[in-house]
Image: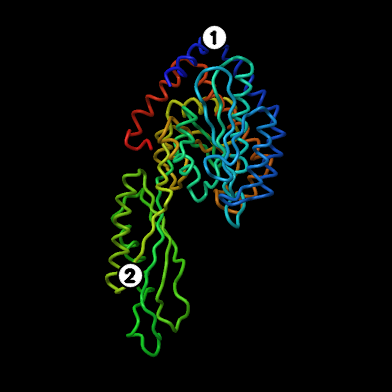
Amino acid sequence: MTVAINSAQATQQQCDFPEAQNVIYAEIDRISPELRELSADLHAHPEVGMQEHHAHDILTNYLEKNGFELTRHAFDLETAFMATYTKGLGLRVGFCSEYDALPGLGHACGHNIIAISGVANAMAMKALLDKGLASGTVVLFGCPSEEPLDGKILMAKKGAFQDHADVCSMLHPGPMNMTYWAGTAIQDVKVEFLGKPAHAGGAPWNGVNALDAICQAWVSIGLLRQQLLATDRIHGIITDGGKAPNIIPDRTAGYFYVRAKTTNRVEELMEKVENCFKAAALATGCEVNMKWREAGMCKNVIQNPVMAETYARYYREFGSKGKPIESRQAQEANQMGGSTDFGNVAHLMPGLHPFYDIYTDEFPHTEGFAKHTGTEEAHEGTMIASKSLAMVSAHMFLEKGFYEKAYQEFDITVPKEQRC
């Protein structure tokens, strides 16, 4: 790490920063029509998590054609990839592309344009390196399965980010602009109650009702919400409620999400939820089985303020027709309850994950949003945000002390015991 930072600083002192900005913007403008074609292709061929074979192939083929070294099917995941380009010693600047779709809704979270925003940033940094304005490595991580919130977690367990990058960022479309969105930590659990069947009309006293158990658990969780923080979320569905009205159900099942602002708070809520399940089993005489997500907890997003303020400065220069980027205080007072596995990346290194406006009032995970992510208007917004994010990475390469300032903020906000 020390060698990389010192090499980057040597380059910083020789940089013509306005020239670097011109190179980055010109490169994204040059490839914008090609990126539009890639986005339209992904939008027309939605694939759910861990099945994104078409997306994997068209993205890796494009990057390889443009001079990147490709690792396909990376980190023991069939549809993950890593693309790298190196010119000299220096920082390793990373970006993430996502490309999985939602079941039944297609690209209702805009991963088709998230994919091309990552490509745009990687290509812009490559152009900067090729012009000799910086030295170092650009890395694009192709990240499958964000919707189930496990792709980056599994990649991180294989050392993907911490072994290949010093800093990482990505973009997410939405109906707003937010640079301090703090996506919640989340863990999920599948619960099963096992009872004893009986004829519901003829001899119900012979049964042990598993439906009673899951209903009691549901009510207990509902009552628990009275004593939760306003930022806590527990929500779920009953996936099996029995087979027929005239049979006492001997098995029922549910699937629940537990979310909070921090991983520590999620762990506290997990214990409370488990107690609701255990109490319901005890009260009804059922057996209960609980299985928390094997990949591990999806951590909360920690936005690096050095990176966030730099992104916002460049974004504002475009005078975008989108909604304004509010102050950090205003954003933090108006947080959303969503989650993303990029939180696990932001616990490993300085990271940034802004929401950017694609000029719609539709919210992600809706049919209206899915339709809009395929439009020219959404593409326009993506290119503006991509240029703004690319300039953050340009500062990493070119401004003396910029990476150190970002890392210092990371060191303050991310406890060492959580960097895994």
Query: With 119 as the anchor, is 254 left or right in this view?
Result: left
Q: Amino acid at mark 1?
A: Gln
How far from the left and from the top, in percent, is residue 101?
59, 50
How far from the left and from the top, in percent, is residue 258?
38, 53
Q: Secondary structure at mark 1?
A: loop
State the image quarter where residue 373 is shown.
top right
Q: Secondary structure at mark 2?
A: strand
Q: What separation in Å lies between label 1 and label 2 (alpha carbons)? A: 69 Å
Count how many numbered circles sit on residues in the image. 2
Q: Nearer the viewer, residue 22 or 397?
A: 397
Residue picked out by circle 2 = 287
Q: Amino acid at mark 2?
A: Glu
Task: Answer above or below: position of 60 versus 28.
Answer: below
Q: Residue furthest bottom?
A: 202
State the image quarter where residue 28 is shown.
top right
Task: Answer above or below: position of 345 versus 279.
Answer: above
Q: Are marks 1 and 2 in contact (CB under 8 Å)?
A: no
Q: Quadrant of the C terminus?
A: top left
Q: Residue furthest top?
A: 14
Query: With 5 as the anchor, is 47 left or right in this view?
Result: right
* Label number found at residue 14: 1
Q: Callout 2: few (<14), some (14-19), or many (20+) C-alpha neighbours within 10 Å? A: some
Q: Callout 1: few (<14), some (14-19), or many (20+) C-alpha neighbours within 10 Å? A: few
Q: Residue at x 65, y 33 (%)?
A: 63
* Label number found at residue 371: none
Query: How is colour applied across the structure in the image?
Result: rainbow
Query: With 268 as the anchor, is 70 left or right in this view?
Result: right
Q: Nearer the viewer, residue 408 or 386?
A: 408
How far from the left and from the top, in percent, is residue 352?
47, 33
Q: Quadrant of the N terminus?
A: top left
Mark toward the start of the polypeptide (1 vs 2): 1
How far from the left and from the top, in percent, is residue 41?
70, 44
